[in-house]
């Protein structure tokens, strides 16, 4: 009897904020085996209709993920809020849930959408947890799979090309591999500069920073025109070629290539705010690229995309050469085109010091 | 009575739980889904977990990763448990580790597409009786690094074997407190490479049939620089004459075929009591970064080798068929054979004393190496002042102190078999 009462009390503790149909945050292991247990979506699961308090959002320039369509949502416990930061990821309260769902128009089913996976990033009391849920073929639900096998998907690119790929669902460690800042799991996308854009809410179009502030999810944000803003990588109206290329590199490379990231050993740092030309790859010798260098001498050679290791690695699908290492199996043709155009627009030369140059001697 | 058996049961249960807590052994069987089960075990591991792998060839088609501290991965033997990545489709490495207190022993990692075993940012690394190999022999298609700790502290690599890496077989980069001992590096571009690292002891190893045997490098443009305090002793460095098969942009692609030991732009290096034989370009080279021909865009980088002490080595049979740019350029001046020990003669003008010499404690000292021949080839002066006179270099430096690792890394008894 006493045991029952304790269990009830624990249950109440865990679920003080959730109504019978509200979102249910699970902040301890074991995490639920079914995505539905989180109650992020209401009704037909595959419709991804957000539950109360679950807010869709978008980024100015996203990470390329094999051309998948991505649906992003955020939820915070009632009465809590994130704190604005002009340069870093916002400070999100314990209980925050980010959900990102990956889908394709399935060429095998007449272009009907097939949802592959939903990744949750949950702010537990002991830090952020990464939870990959894999959708079933019937699209009725998704199951937690910490080390899922790849799955074959077919879709038609707007160019008309049919793609058939073994889509790789990252395992929990691979999630951590990208969401790693000084070895602490951290969100990547929700920074001011990337959220500072309009979104079509059911109530109408509004800037995301403004909307989050209005609903109580964000405090401390300035008006959008005073907040930093990344351009949209493929919208020339949103920024210069240089700014769009740097935004693309930040979102596709800098989660590892920053001084606190997993690729900090390379000394190549690709945040858009990077100002040291060598650190962003200009005439930088690929000291630890091993064979990734592709017989080329520098990461970026001004004016010469074909001589730039950066392009070589973006254009490769070979595991030891390709960059990013994770999260894609096909080349992002449009992204490569942008980076090629950017490098071609740069001026300067990388003079390899001629061998046997006299310097000093004893 | 009922009560008693219930408590007995509870006791028994508790006991089972306790013992399983203490051992935390996670044995994996071969068979279907091995890839998935292994990766799940790596994710589910808790500090203290030992993942025991079975005997046999275990086929994997994706890279594996571990991020839990104090985990041991243990096979049944360096020739018995073989993780084969011949059919690897994704992942930049065979096994990527980003966890402290990591131990891996008694297994082989073969034919990965990229690096074999990469350990990044760990404090406490033990690699014991591990073989990394590309089984098709030297090829530019092989992966870059075999055993590859980078930005680690307290690293022990022992009784291990690295074969066929298209960059370096055993490569320790941007790390500190390192022991590489009783290991064998064969048919790699670089056999054993200590790069941008401090406090390393490399001893009792064999480096043979690589392009270059043992490399001590300090390179620019990396976040961790100032490599040094490295001792290379009691190693066997012979016949490293495999044609260089490194990718052109990589640093090791510049290593001339036929290189024994190179000290590049690193300070405080002691090379002693090694047997260095029959390396066709040079048995021992001490060079500045300028000699690589690469530009230096890094203001905080020190390109000069200083405080180098090469003594009491057995050196013979080198320089008989020199390779590389320098040998070509030198041939008209010095002929087709090179001496056993080469120094490019480039020193930092800011360090020179009034007598135009390096200060006592930063000298290049070369002595007691039998009758091994020597040449300062004056790379900075177009080979105009080549000197074969060893007398200016006949001196000694204070011996460097030994590397001591904290107990768990250095002294852990071998488990398994």
Image (tube, helix red, strand yellow):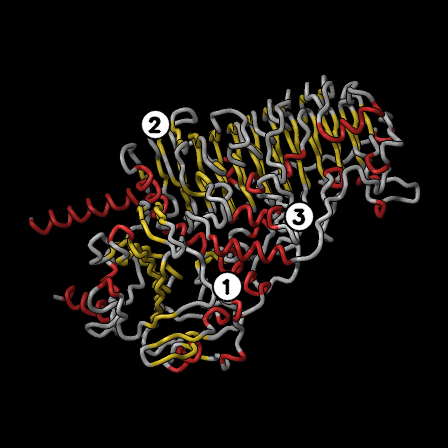
Task: Give the crowd class for mark 3: few <14, some 14-19, many >=20 residues within 10 Å.
Answer: many
Left or right for B252, reference B58? right
Residue drawn at 68 percent across, 42 percent down: B218
User: What element does badge 2 sit on?
Assistant: loop
Residue farthest to the left?
A: B1
Return the chain for callout 3. B
Towards the viewer: A106 or A253: A106
The residue wearing badge 3 is: B225
Q: Considering only vertical position in the picture, is B51 above or below A120?
A: above
Where, by quadrant of the figure, is residue B89 drawn?
Answer: top left
Q: Position of residue B174 (x, y in %)?
A: 60, 45
User: What element does badge 1 sit on?
Assistant: loop
Return the chain for callout 2. B
Left or right for B344, reference B8? right
Q: Who comes first in sequence, dot 3 or dot 2?
A: 2
Left or right for A276, reference B37? right
The residue wearing badge 2 is: B55
Q: Position of residue A155 (x, y in %)?
A: 33, 52
Q: Which mark is residue B132?
A: none
Towards the viewer: A298 or A53: A298
Return the chain for callout 1. A
Of circles 3 and 1, the one toward us is 1
Q: Mark 2–mark 1 contact, CB under 8 Å? A: no
Residue drawn at 22 percent across, 52 percent down: A137
* Count of marks overlaid on the render: 3
Left or right for A258, reference A162? right
**Are both tags, 3 and 2, on one chain?**
yes
Q: Mark 3–mark 1 contact, CB under 8 Å? A: no
Towards the viewer: B288 or A204: A204
The residue wearing badge 1 is: A233
**Are both tags, 3 and 1, on one chain?**
no
Where, by quadrant of the figure, is residue B171 drawn?
Answer: top right
């Amino acid at each position: 009897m006493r045991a029952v009462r304790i269990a009830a009390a624990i249950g109440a503790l865990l679920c003080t904020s959730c109504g019978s149909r509200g979102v249910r945050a699970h902040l301890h292991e074991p995490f639920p085996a079914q995505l539905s247990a989180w109650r992020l979506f209401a009704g037909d699961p595959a419709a991804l209709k957000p539950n109360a308090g679950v807010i869709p959002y978008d980024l100015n320039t996203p990470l390329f993920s094999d051309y998948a369509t991505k649906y992003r949502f955020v939820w915070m416990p009632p009465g809590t809020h994130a704190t604005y930061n002009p340069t870093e990821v916002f400070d999100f309260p314990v209980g925050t849930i980010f959900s990102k769902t990956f889908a394709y128009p399935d060429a095998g089913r007449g272009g009907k959408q097939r949802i592959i996976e939903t990744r949750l990033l949950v702010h537990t009391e002991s830090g952020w947890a990464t939870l990959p849920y894999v959708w079933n073929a019937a699209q009725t639900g998704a199951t937690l799979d910490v080390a899922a096998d790849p799955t074959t998907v077919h879709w038609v690119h707007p160019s008309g090309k049919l793609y058939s790929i073994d889509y790789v669902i990252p395992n929990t460690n691979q999630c951590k591999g990208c969401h790693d800042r000084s070895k602490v799991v951290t969100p990547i996308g929700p920074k001011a500069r990337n959220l500072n854009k309009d979104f079509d809410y059911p109530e109408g179009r509004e800037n995301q920073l403004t909307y989050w502030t209005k609903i109580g999810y964000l405090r401390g944000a300035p008006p959008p025109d005073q907040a930093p803003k990344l351009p949209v990588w493929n919208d020339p109206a949103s920024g210069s070629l240089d700014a769009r290329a740097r935004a693309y590199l930040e979102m596709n490379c800098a989660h590892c290539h920053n001084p606190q990231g997993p690729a900090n050993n390379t000394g190549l740092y690709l945040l858009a705010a990077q100002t040291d030309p060598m650190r962003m790859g200009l005439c930088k010798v690929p000291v630890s690229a091993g064979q990734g260098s592709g017989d080329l001498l520098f990461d970026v050679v001004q004016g010469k995309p074909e001589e730039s290791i950066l392009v070589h690695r973006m254009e490769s699908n070979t595991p030891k050469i390709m960059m990013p290492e994770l999260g894609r199996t096909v080349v992002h043709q449009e992204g490569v085109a942008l980076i090629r155009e950017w490098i071609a627009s740069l001026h300067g030369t990388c003079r390899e010091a001629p061998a046997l140059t006299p310097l000093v001697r004893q | 009575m009922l009560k008693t058996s219930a408590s007995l049961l509870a006791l028994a249960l508790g006991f089972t739980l306790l013992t399983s807590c203490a051992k935390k052994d996670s044995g994996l069987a071969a068979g279907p889904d091995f890839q998935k089960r292994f990766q799940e075990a790596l994710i589910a591991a808790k500090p203290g977990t030992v993942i025991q792998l079975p005997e046999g060839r275990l086929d994997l088609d994706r890279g594996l990763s571990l991020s839990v501290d104090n985990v041991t991965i243990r096979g049944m033997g360096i020739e018995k448990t073989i993780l084969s990545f011949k059919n690897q489709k994704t992942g930049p490495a065979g096994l990527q580790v980003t966890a402290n207190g990591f131990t891996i022993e008694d297994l082989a990692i073969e034919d990965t597409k990229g690096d074999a075993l990469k350990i990044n940012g760990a404090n406490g690394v033990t690699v014991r009786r591990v073989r990394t190999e590309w089984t098709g022999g030297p090829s530019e298609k092989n992966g870059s690094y075999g055993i590859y700790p980078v930005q680690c502290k307290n690293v022990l690599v022992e009784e291990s074997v690295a074969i066929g890496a298209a960059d370096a077989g055993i490569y320790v980069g941007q790390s500190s407190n390192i022991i590489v001992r009783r290991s064998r590096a064969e048919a790699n571009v670089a056999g054993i490479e200590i790069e941008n690292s401090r406090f390393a002891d490399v001893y009792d190893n064999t480096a043979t049939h690589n392009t270059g045997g043992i490399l001590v490098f300090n390179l620019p443009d990396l976040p961790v620089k100032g490599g040094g305090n490295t001792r290379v002793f009691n190693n066997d460095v012979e016949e490293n004459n495999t044609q260089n098969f490194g990718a052109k942009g990589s640093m090791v692609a510049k290593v001339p075929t036929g290189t024994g030991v190179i000290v590049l732009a690193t300070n405080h290096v002691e090379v002693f009591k090694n047997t260095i034989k029959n390396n066709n370009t040079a048995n021992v080279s001490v060079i500045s970064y300028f000699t690589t021909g690469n530009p230096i865009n890094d203001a905080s980088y020190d390109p000069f080798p200083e405080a180098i002490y090469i003594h009491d080595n057995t050196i013979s049979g080198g320089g008989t068929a020199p390779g590389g740019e320098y040998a070509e350029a030198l041939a008209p001046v010095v002929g087709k054979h090179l001496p056993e020990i080469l120094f490019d003669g480039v020193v930092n003008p800011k360090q020179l004393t009034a007598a135009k010499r390096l200060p006592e404690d930063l000298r290049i000292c070369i002595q007691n190496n039998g009758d091994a021949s020597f040449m300062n080839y004056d790379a900075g002066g177009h080979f105009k002042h080549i000197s074969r006179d060893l007398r200016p270099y006949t001196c000694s430096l204070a011996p460097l102190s030994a590397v001591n690792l904290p107990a768990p890394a250095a002294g852990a008894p071998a488990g398994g078999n």
